[in-house]
Amino acid sequence: MENVISDRGSRYAVAGGPAASPEEAKAFVKALCRNKKFARATHNTWGLLLESGPVKNDDGESGAGLVICRMLERKGLYDTVVVVTRWYGGKHLGGDRFRHVQDAVRMWLAEA
């Protein structure tokens, strides 16, 4: 797996693709989780920006979906789901976890 952010044992990865509805976003995450590595992750947080507004799922990582949606809004990137996966390393990261979510989304946007 490339483009992994590591901090105090936690690891972050990012994936994204087209999605025109919340159902398509959920299907994207479900397909991602067919890979055992992602299925075993602590959190698969995602955000999706639709014409009707943002849709997100924090998957237990409170506030992370909103961070993803805000970044998509700034880029004006609609109908695209971005998933940030975290494997918890045993140490709380506090506010740094949001910085890592932002960095992961930035990496994906740079490659997309």
Image (spheres, helix red, strand yellow):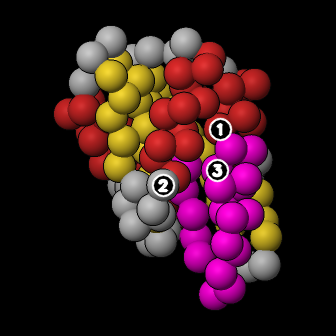
Judging by the rendered image, the residue that carries numbered circle 3 is: 101
Residue 82 in sight here:
no
Q: Quadrant of the C terminus?
A: top right
| Residue depicted at x 43% and y 38% | 47
C-beta proximity under 8 Å, tags 1 and 3: yes
| Residue depicted at x 58% and y 70% | 87
Dot 2: within a 10 Å radius of its alpha carbon, few (fewer than 14), some, or many (20 or more) residues? some
* Above or below for 94 versus 76: below
Mark 1: which amino acid?
Answer: Val
Q: Which residues are the magenta region?
A: 84-103
Judging by the rendered image, the residue that carries numbered circle 2 is: 63
Dot 3: within a 10 Å radius of its alpha carbon, few (fewer than 14), some, or many (20 or more) residues? many
Q: Is residue 107 left or right of residue 60?
A: right
State which tag comes first along the sequence, 2 or 1.
Answer: 2
**Residue found farthest to the bottom:** 90
Query: Toward which corner of the image does residue 34 lie, by quadrant?
Result: bottom left
User: Does the magenta-highlighted stretch encompass residue 90?
Assistant: yes
Q: Is residue 44 left or right of residue 56?
A: right
Q: Secondary structure at mark 3?
A: helix
Q: Secondary structure at mark 2?
A: loop
Judging by the rendered image, the residue that carries numbered circle 1 is: 105
State which tag comes first along the sequence, 2 or 3.
Answer: 2
Mark 3: which amino acid?
Answer: Val
